[in-house]
Image (cartoon, coloured by chain):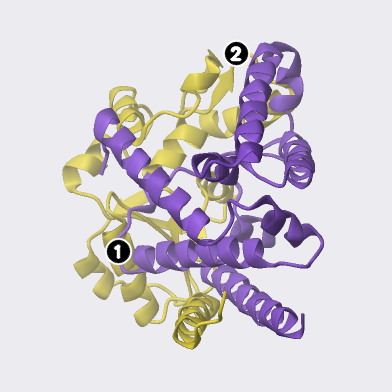
Amino acid sequence: MTLHAPLFVAALILGGGAAAIDGVAGRDDMTAVALAEAIVAGQMPRVFDLRSHAEFETFHIPSATRITIGDLMALDLPRSASIVLYGDESARVAQARAVLRFRGYRHVASLRQGLYEWIARVHEPALAVDATPAEREEFDRLAALSRYFGGRPRLDVPRAELHPSVETALLVAAIRRRGC
Amino acid sequence: MVVSTVPALGLALVLGMAFGWLLERAGLGNARKLVGQFYLKDLTVLEVLFSALVTAMLGVFWLDRLGLLDMRAVYLPDTFAVPQALGGALFGGGLVLAGLCPGTSCVAAATGRADGVAVMAGLVIGILAFNFAFDSLNQVYASTPLGPLTLPDVLHLPAGVVVGMVTMMALGIFTVARRLKRDA
């Protein structure tokens, strides 16, 4: 295989560019469990929900505030504030993240996999019916977090149903809405 | 976007055939070429697969950053440290012994190579044996669950920095591989 100079340069630019934009901006995603633990620990990151009013009313992460990208343009927080964003379209979240970074906010993260991971891991963590001791230990940790936020840990779930689809997870969360 | 089952299977077939064709064009249906990797005599496997990995990684990263790809729709498989390490060792041992991996064995078989057919037969036997023994293997299979881990999670670095590091590593390896080939 020959080394193609244009491809080499393209990879160099794209890889270097990726490192540059994230290296300057800092870590850009946060897991649902990390966010839940931060809230429980009293660190209180500012959580912003970029979805519609109706979707927000149906279900949202405790402590989240609904906001639009227009509102973010006028947001007035200390530039060192820790901010977590989530929404139903990754494009909108990326746009919101870009707006905040442009305005000088240094610690802006998006919630990894949006609400899906929050529902699957924090709101309704599941324990497989044939769980191993290690899985049970992990479940106990997540279940404690879940109860803190008014969630509903699920026990004895068939292993094939441990990971609900995004649509199912959101639907389930809407039906079982509680404490938020 | 959610693709229903029949179109998804059709798409998988097309992608699978394209993948097989590319493997064949890269010469990876040849067991000698694959085994050459382990003796550091032929780095084609590393070049082809690392090129594919870096292309996919850069594509996913930038499509996400440009808002063109919904990362929530990308399934992240869970990490199970011990069973995956055992599986990796077993897979590597089998690859050295047979000179082919599952994908390249299909390519070799499709081009009429007997060793490809033999490896595919072994593959099917292995799958059946694993499934029949699954109940007794389940404790190991489901042990050490770490969730959907990624390199940025493990290294506590921003995704873009990891993308940059892996890209630079790949380009460095490609340069070394080219020099080795030139000196050979």
* Image location (x, y in percent) of residue B46: 65, 64
Q: Are marks 1 and 2 in contact (CB under 8 Å)?
A: no
| Residue density around tag 1, few if under 14, some if 14–19, many if 20 or more, within 10 Å | some
Measured Cα–Cα span from mark 1 to mark 2? 38 Å
Decide which of A99, B115 is in the foreground and name it: B115
* Image location (x, y in percent) of residue B43: 69, 67
Residue B184 visible in the current orientation:
yes
Q: Give the vertical position of B149 relative to B38 (above or below).
A: above
Q: Chain of mark 1?
A: B
Residue tagged 2: A129
- Is A158 on the left or on the right of B129, as rendered? left
Task: Give, as a three-letter code, the residue at label 1.
Answer: Gly
Decide which of A117, B90 is in the foreground and name it: B90
Residue at 44% from the left image edge and 65% from the top image edge? B61
- Is A177 on the left or on the right of B33, as rendered? left
| Quadrant, the N terminus of chain A | bottom right
Query: Please, what secondary structure does the residue beneath circle 2 have?
Result: loop
Task: Give, as a three-letter code, the residue at label 2.
Answer: Val
